[in-house]
Image (cartoon, helix red, strand yellow):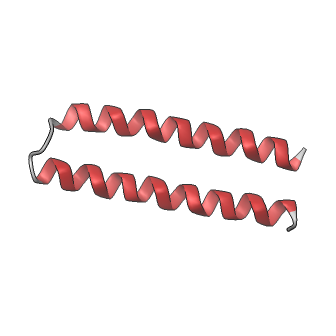
């Protein structure tokens, strides 16, 4: 597989994961399962790890 297509696929999957995370957090807040600030803080931490992983992997693959 070409390196560029690998990175494109990786970015597409990570965007899907982040979008699912936003949907999940909004659903949990609507159902009043957990406090909103706690959920959003957890989502922000996971999103930061996902973005860092994508950037780092893309850098390694394309270098």
**Whole-percent x and y of residue 5?**
78, 66
Quadrant of res 14: bottom right
Q: Is residue 16 left or right of residue 11?
A: left
Which residue occupies 77% across, 62% down? Answer: 6
Q: Where is residue 49 in the image (x, y as percent from the top left)?
A: 54, 36
* Figure quadrant of the C terminus: top right
Give the residue displayed 24% in from the left and 31% down from the top: 38
Q: Is residue 11 left or right of residue 7?
A: left
Please tell me in which quadrant of the rendered image residue 46 appears: top left
Image quadrant in which the N terminus is located = bottom right
The residue at the point 74 percent across, 57 percent down is 7
- Say above or below: 56 vs 30: above
Q: Which residue lies furthest to the left in this view?
A: 32
Q: Is residue 12 left or right of residue 61?
A: left
Q: In which quarter of the image is residue 53?
A: top right
Point 29% across, 54% down: residue: 24
How many discs mark residues in the rendered view?
A: 0
Q: In the figure, is residue 30 to the left or right of 24?
A: left
Q: Looking at the picture, how far across and down is residue 59, in whole percent?
A: 80, 42
Residue 47: x %, y % from top left: 47, 41
Task: Decide: is 2 above or below 25.
Answer: below
Whether residue 11 is situated above or below residue 54 in the rendered picture: below
């Amino acid at each position: 597989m070409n390196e560029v297509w690998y990175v494109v696929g990786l970015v597409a999957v990570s965007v899907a994961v982040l979008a699912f995370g936003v949907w999940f957090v909004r659903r949990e807040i609507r159902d009043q399962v957990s406090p909103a600030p706690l959920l959003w803080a957890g989502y922000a931490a996971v999103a930061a790890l996902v973005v860092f992983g994508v950037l780092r992997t893309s850098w390694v693959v394309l270098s």
